[in-house]
Amino acid sequence: MNKNLKSPVILALDIGTSSVRSALYNCEAEVLPEMMVKNDRAVKMTEDGGAVIGAAEAFAQVAQAIDDVLEISPPEVAEIEYVAASCFWHSLVGIDAKGDTTTPVFTWAETRPAKYVPTLRDKLDEAKIHNRTGCRFHSSYWTAKLLWLRKEREDIFKKTAKWLSFSDFVALKLFGAIQTSVSMASATGIFDIRLSDWDNELLKFLKIKRENLTEIVAEDSQTFQLNEKYAERWKQLKNANWFLAIGDGAANNIGAGCVQKSKAALMIGTSGAMRVAYGGKVPKEIPGGLWCYRIDRKKTIIGGALSDGGGLYRWLKDNFRLKKNDDKTEVEIEKRIPDGHGLTFLPFLAGERSTGYHENARGAVLGLKSATDTIDIVQAALESVAYRFAEIYDQLNDVAKIKEIIASGGALRESPVWTQIIADVLAQNMSLPDVREASSRGAVLLALEMIGKIKSIEEIETPKGQEYKFNKKRNAIYKKARKRHENFYKLLIE
């Protein structure tokens, strides 16, 4: 067996909203040569704000990704010893007493429950609950979703025996276990992140009993094995020990080498996020514009999320018919003066999460004139996302003194210009490591720590990548533009 195949071999699953990835790793968290599969999929968006995936279809896509990577695995990999996984946060799916689904998988982008956010804010103390659960009231979280289902889908609510995250549904199908990790539970919005338990006040308000929820796994290191059906289907995984999934954002930080308070991970995929992860307790006071979840019982992750990231850039390219000219668009933006267009773009096509959590915020372009062209608008949009990251960055610095920013995500890899804009706006140097699947790698690293193959995830070196150094002159221009952006933002939400 060659060096890359030395034991143990770990199967990694990265279950996202827009794709499912599977890969084989060695015990040094290196992907085995050509052992990665990516299967794209689409969330079903409806006119009334729905954003769902059929539960059976979503599970079949996970199973297919496993089939695909095992099919191309080398003969030397006769047995895979461990399986680690990351999964998108905030999903919700119901099952009845027989284990059959009562709902599709509601994703984080589901906005139909937004109408119940004012009710939550009126009836409950949002500030106290945010500091207890790490989650504001927002349609992405279970608080609004469950209230919406109870009020408008009463028949479904009554026949649902258990409410699960999608990763819990996968575990149920594969192992027969109705258990969840602290990481997945912590992003539901109904979980006390300091006690690592479901929040009693919210359960009472939502009329949910503990037996209606998954059991929190007793030990973070607990593993499971396949049931008879899937052990027969995947013989290489017959004796494998499966860890419960952790949140994709937590896995991304670990995989990008951001597991200290001095390092922030900035990711732009379809959406965007900026996060700090560290070993230690939840902050005494969580800044109002940020969320705070758990990686496990010993590790915390805090940050902010943007609904509009790479999806916004793609929308602009599609609607301005620039998709065939990606390189030309990048070159043209790079040649232009920062904020030279004089526009203010408010990047809320999908509403706002961090830092204001305004459900009904909408996008806008202000300052248009006859000389404005499509590149001006695209440039203004990219700069505006950087301004929103700056709001998150400022609040993160209240709880962590950030000295280094590690970037990741397909949108930034495809747009060096955008990465440079963000560095200039934040006045922080950034690096883009050569780790293309940070979430997948992060799940593997955490598994290796739990089985004792590595002492600590903090000791693992992340491969260096391209460096982006901020420019002081451009930062001075962006400071003024950001103030203008903030003034219009306040007008939008008031």
Image (cartoon, grey):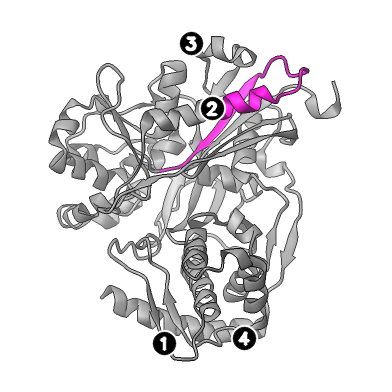
What span is in magenta?
Answer: 65-89
Residue at image point 43% right, 50% down: 292
Q: Alpha-carbon distance for marks 2 and 3?
A: 15 Å
Q: Is residue 465 visible?
A: yes
Q: Which residue is mark 3?
A: 229
Residue at image point 54% right, 54% down: 269
Dot 4, how many residues are within 10 Å of its Cα: few (below 14), some (14-19), or many (20+)? few
Under mark 2, the amino acid is Gln
Q: Alpha-carbon distance for marks 2 and 4?
A: 47 Å
Element type at marker 3?
Answer: helix
Front residue of this view, candidates 174 and 130: 174
Q: Does 125 sit above or below residue 383?
A: above
Viewer-nearest of discs 2 and 3: 2
Q: Alpha-carbon distance for marks 1 and 2?
A: 49 Å
Q: Tell me if 71 is positioned left or right of 365 in this view.
A: right
Q: Which residue is mark 4?
A: 337
Q: Alpha-carbon distance for marks 4 and 1?
A: 17 Å
Element type at marker 4?
Answer: loop
Viewer-nearest of discs 2 and 4: 2
Under mark 3, the amino acid is Lys
Mark closer to the chain start, 2 or 3: 2
Q: Position of residue 70 (x, y in %)?
A: 65, 23
Dot 1, how many residues are within 10 Å of its Cα: few (below 14), some (14-19), or many (20+)? few
